[in-house]
Image: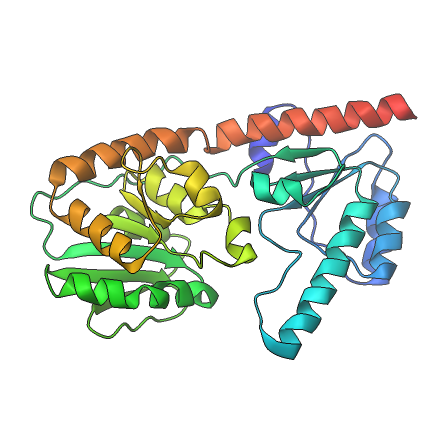
Amino acid sequence: MAPHLEARGIACRVVAYPRGARARRALRASVSAGDVVLIHRARPTPREARFWRALPAPRIYDFDDAVMWGRRRGLRGAWTRRQRSAGFARALACADAATCGNSFLAAQCGDLPTAIVPSAVPLDVPLHTPRADAAPFRVGWVGRTTNLRYVREIGAALAELARVIPLEVVCVSDGELALPGCRVVNVRWTREGEAAAVAGFDAGIMPLALAEPWSRGKCAYKLLQYMAAGVPAVGSDVGMNADLIQSGENGLLARSAGDWVNALAALAGDLALRTRIGRAGRETARAYGYPAVADRLAAFVACVAVGSSASR
């Protein structure tokens, strides 16, 4: 994002979050009153919160997930959630403004001036070419090993589909996926190979747990990746997935196992549908490309800077 902000007249310096006292002192000494400090995702300890407040420039807290909650269950999960919630509350209390990825996250910021700045997706990526004979039909997913559980949760639906059409599940990840009843091709994720792998999907999926608050905080980045490549996207009907997709127009939404089977079967059996939805998704993705998102972020940073100057 920094080069895009630079192109809009905002000089940027990207630094690692300072974990030690020496690093904090060095950063504080390098920040002037005319700067704006954008802090990404960190949940400060009480000591770090004092450091945030001591910075002589306005602070924007930026986050793109439900960082105020954890996903663990049981006693350990309860402790994690309390720690995350306390850190998030400290971050908001220390910030002059916030940026976040969707409306659900914005609602967690209370009265703090907040801008919705979605996760930006590259648009200059290899484009999918719909195959007239999509056999096997390649259903793809890209993501971290910690999120493979969402794909496993629709494993029965994928296995049901595999009984009626030739199906290949392509998993692009740092981990490996196995699904009973399905042929799975595991592709090791690399930054250089990700876009080409996505362009090879016949459909891209983003399943989530409908009842989890964590899911409502997700910013639909996988769907945007698929859309940017012109790949028809299917996502769980929750959170930003539901905001992004107009089902049947620029993607498809699913709430149940039957929905997943029907949506993917419809795409597999209809080249015209795949082509139309892929093109519409690509158009949707343009509003989430780096140029559009950088415009939004640059305007908000400028407002924060001007407001801070006026209050001094």
Q: Is residue 158 left or right of residue 173?
A: left
Q: Looking at the picture, how far across and down is residue 295, in whole percent?
A: 57, 25
Image quadrant where one finds the C terminus? top right
Which of these two is toward me, 24 or 220?
220
The residue located at (7%, 48%) in the rendering is 133
Q: Looking at the picture, how far across and down is residue 186, in whole percent?
A: 29, 67
The residue furthest bottom is 75
The residue located at (26%, 37%) in the rendering is 278
Image quadrant where one finds the N terminus? top right
The residue located at (56%, 40%) in the rendering is 102
Q: Looking at the picture, how far across and down is residue 301, in whole percent?
A: 70, 29
Which coloring applies here? rainbow
The residue furthest left is 133
Compared to 181, does 95 lie above or below?
above
Q: Is residue 15 left or right of residue 211?
A: right
The residue located at (34%, 39%) in the rendering is 227
Find residue 140 and report its image quarter.
bottom left
Q: Is residue 82 left or right of residue 269?
A: right
The residue furthest right is 312
